């Protein structure tokens, strides 16, 4: 059964160079003309669904924006033809084809590894919530030199890759943020967008992709060496207290397969803000970037892009006398202390620019913390952004889906509170968690079209516990495949980090915070996304004064941001062409 198509319409899109080309595009959208399709693809999932969250406003500008948002839902995504050449030594994943409405369950990722460069923050990195970490039993970390501070990472390391050449002004920079289980190798998951003449044009831009904190792909995370242990088998670094505690205490410390002490479940709680702020410090301090042209990311990457918008793409609010969540903010860098107009002391990071009230520098994690001097004036460090398939915060719906996955891991008898045998990890729980995620990433219609009620063996039972459903085989395959590249603790910690996403936390209402994001923002939403529905992208555009909404038409659901690379590339390329 084919999904009805809108008529092809011409769209003006940017190509490499200075000219524009006229292209025609025909992409799928959902329709309610067919009863079966209506039941599998409800109106609330369609591209024509544009119900906005109620906001009280008398502004004519907001009214005009509402009209733009509604009309965007009926627009057809543009299409471009890009060169087939890629940068030297880049191997892209095979592109999934949805041009002919092929909704096969393609894999989102190519070969995943930790290849790249490493940035190590020069001093202990203070996280958003600072305090004493209390997970380990007192008998383990009784020595003061071995306490694990809950709000500190030392060392704090990020894995990252760069592509293209930095210009003399050091401002032709694109920052690309990956999703939940991605890595810093952009070619492994958005390879069709990377290369000369493509959306991420390596002839024109200097492209930076960072692995998130807490990941297992090169940045510091649960599988990283545990601070306070040199992990040298020939050097006994155990304390007297540990010797007295004996084997039980030794075994309580998480260890890897080679018996090296690691963070494990004792890895501190990290927020999306912590990840983004360390990336910003990498960009400023190590790469010496003067200005970022655009930050782009989908899903978890979109959440990072939104934090970039707030911390580095917003105008700083005028101090109102109560601090508005900025008092006592803890930052990094040179640990310079300043006071804002509200009188609250804050330790700040020493980034260039004026701060809130009387503060010389930006308040850590605050609105508009990172600024730069460009073209003779102070302006936001980030000049534009493209957040894709995300919202302003992780909602109860999304937290619930994350928690269901974590509960699958916890229910595995081998989990043991996260202190499991590294040689016998809770693989079954992690496999089920991944299967739950794979269902949420797609759509009812996509699953129906690909699998229906088909069996892998038509001679087998047609129902019951032994029925060989094709969809069951697919999910089991995806779950088992995931075990090759991820571990249970890392998955738990990263889903918890994703649940931390809330740009309003400690800053004010979401609408108020977004009102300060005045840089151009192109928000991309997917018409069939069940996990992060269009309503959330509509809210982002409604509340940011210089934002527009573009729709990705797809049967693939949330994973459309990875699978519909032609549409995503067209919107990104057009936006980059149109904005400085």
Image: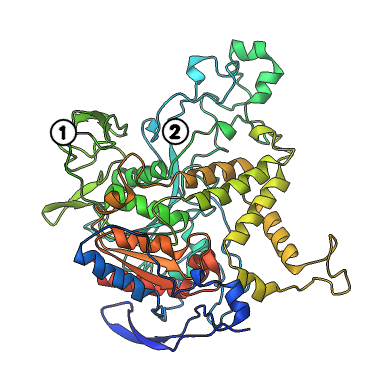
- Specify few, some or many for label 1: CA neighbours under 10 Å numbering under 14, 14-19, or 20 or more: some
Q: How is the image coloured?
A: rainbow
Above or below, 230 against 527 in this view is above
Front-lying residue, 62 or 352: 62
Dot 2 and dot 1 residues touching (CB under 8 Å): no
Which residue position holds label 1?
Answer: 341
Where residue 361 sits in the image (x, y, percent)?
Answer: 20, 38
Q: Is residue 452 visible?
A: yes
Give the x, y percent position of residue 129: 40, 32
What is the x, y in percent for residue 137?
Answer: 59, 20
Work out which quarter of the rendered image holds the C terminus and state it: bottom left
Q: Which mark is residue 293?
A: none
From the top left corner, tell me how far across and down residue 407 is, in percent: 64, 43
Residue drawn at point x = 20 percent, y = 62 percent = 59
Q: Secondary structure at mark 2?
A: loop
Q: Residue at x 16, y 43 (%)?
A: 318
> Which of pointers 2 and 1 indicates the residue nearer the eye?
1
Which numbered disc, 2 or 1, marks the residue that appears first in the sequence? 2
Does residue 196 appear in the picture of this structure? no
Front-most of 486 and 33?
33
Does residue 391 lie above or below 138 as drawn?
below
Q: Secondary structure at mark 1?
A: loop
**Pointer 2 local density, CA inside 10 Å: few below 14, some 14–19, many at least 20:** some
- Residue at 25% across, 30% down: 346
Residue carrying label 2: 155
In front: 264, or 19? 264
Q: Which residue shows up at 20% across the image and 66% down it?
A: 60
Q: Tell me which corner region of the image, top left, top right, bottom left or bottom right, holds residue 278.
A: top left
218 left or right, relative to 344: right
Q: Is residue 510 left or right of residue 419?
A: left
């Amino acid at each position: 059964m084919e999904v009805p198509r809108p008529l092809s319409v011409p769209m003006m899109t940017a190509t490499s160079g200075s000219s524009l080309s006229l292209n025609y595009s025909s992409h799928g959208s959902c329709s309610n003309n067919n009863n079966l399709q209506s039941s599998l693809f409800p109106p609330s999932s369609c591209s024509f669904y544009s119900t906005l969250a109620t906001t009280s406003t008398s502004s004519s500008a907001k009214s005009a924006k509402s009209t733009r948002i509604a009309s965007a839902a009926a627009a057809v995504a543009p299409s471009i033809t890009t060169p087939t050449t890629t940068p030297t030594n880049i191997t892209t994943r095979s592109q999934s084809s949805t041009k002919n409405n092929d909704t096969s369950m393609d894999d989102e990722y190519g070969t995943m590894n930790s290849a790249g460069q490493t940035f190590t923050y020069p001093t202990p990195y203070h996280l958003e919530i600072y305090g004493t970490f209390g997970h380990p039993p007192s008998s383990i970390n009784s020595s003061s030199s071995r306490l694990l501070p809950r709000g500190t990472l030392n060392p704090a390391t990020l894995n990252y890759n760069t592509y293209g050449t930095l210009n003399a002004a050091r401002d032709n920079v694109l920052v690309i943020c990956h999703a939940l289980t991605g890595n810093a190798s952009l070619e492994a998951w958005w390879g069709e967008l990377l290369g000369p003449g493509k959306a991420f044009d390596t002839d024109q831009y200097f492209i930076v992709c960072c692995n998130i904190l807490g990941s297992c792909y090169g940045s510091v995370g649960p599988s990283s060496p545990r601070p306070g242990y040199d992990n040298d088998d020939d050097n006994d670094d155990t304390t007297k207290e540990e010797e007295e505690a004996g084997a039980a205490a030794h075994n309580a410390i998480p260890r890897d397969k080679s018996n090296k002490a690691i963070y494990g479940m004792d890895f501190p709680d990290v927020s999306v803000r912590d990840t983004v702020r360390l990336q910003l410090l990498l960009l400023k301090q190590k790469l010496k970037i003067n200005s970022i042209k655009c930050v782009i990311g989908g899903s978890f990457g979109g959440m990072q892009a939104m934090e970039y918008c707030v911390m580095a793409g917003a105008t700083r609010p005028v101090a109102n006398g109560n601090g508005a969540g900025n008092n006592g903010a803890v930052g990094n860098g040179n640990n310079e202390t300043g006071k804002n107009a509200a009188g609250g002391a804050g330790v700040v990071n020493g980034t260039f620019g004026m701060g809130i009230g009387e503060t010389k520098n930006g308040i850590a994690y605050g609105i508009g913390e990172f600024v730069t001097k460009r073209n003779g004036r102070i302006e936001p460090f980030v000049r534009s952004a493209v957040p894709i398939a995300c919202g302003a915060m992780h909602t109860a719906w999304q937290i619930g889906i994350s928690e269901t996955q974590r509960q699958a891991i916890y229910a595995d008898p081998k989990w043991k509170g996260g202190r499991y045998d590294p040689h016998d990890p809770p693989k079954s729980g992690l496999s089920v968690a991944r299967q739950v995620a794979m269902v949420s990433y797609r759509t009812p219609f996509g699953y129906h079209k690909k699998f229906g009620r088909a069996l892998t063996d038509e001679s087998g039972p047609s129902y019951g516990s032994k029925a060989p459903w094709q969809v069951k085989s697919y999910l089991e395959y995806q779950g088992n495949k995931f075990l090759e590249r991820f571990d249970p603790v890392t998955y738990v910690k990263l889903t918890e980090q994703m649940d931390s996403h809330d740009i309003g936390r400690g800053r004010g209402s979401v609408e108020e915070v977004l009102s300060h994001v005045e840089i151009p923002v192109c928000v991309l939403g997917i018409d069939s996304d069940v996990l992060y529905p269009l309503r959330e992208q509509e809210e982002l555009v409604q509340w940011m004064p210089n934002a527009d909404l573009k729709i990705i038409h797809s049967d693939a659901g949330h994973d459309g941001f990875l699978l519909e690379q032609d549409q995503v590339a067209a919107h990104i390329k057009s936006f980059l062409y149109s904005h400085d």
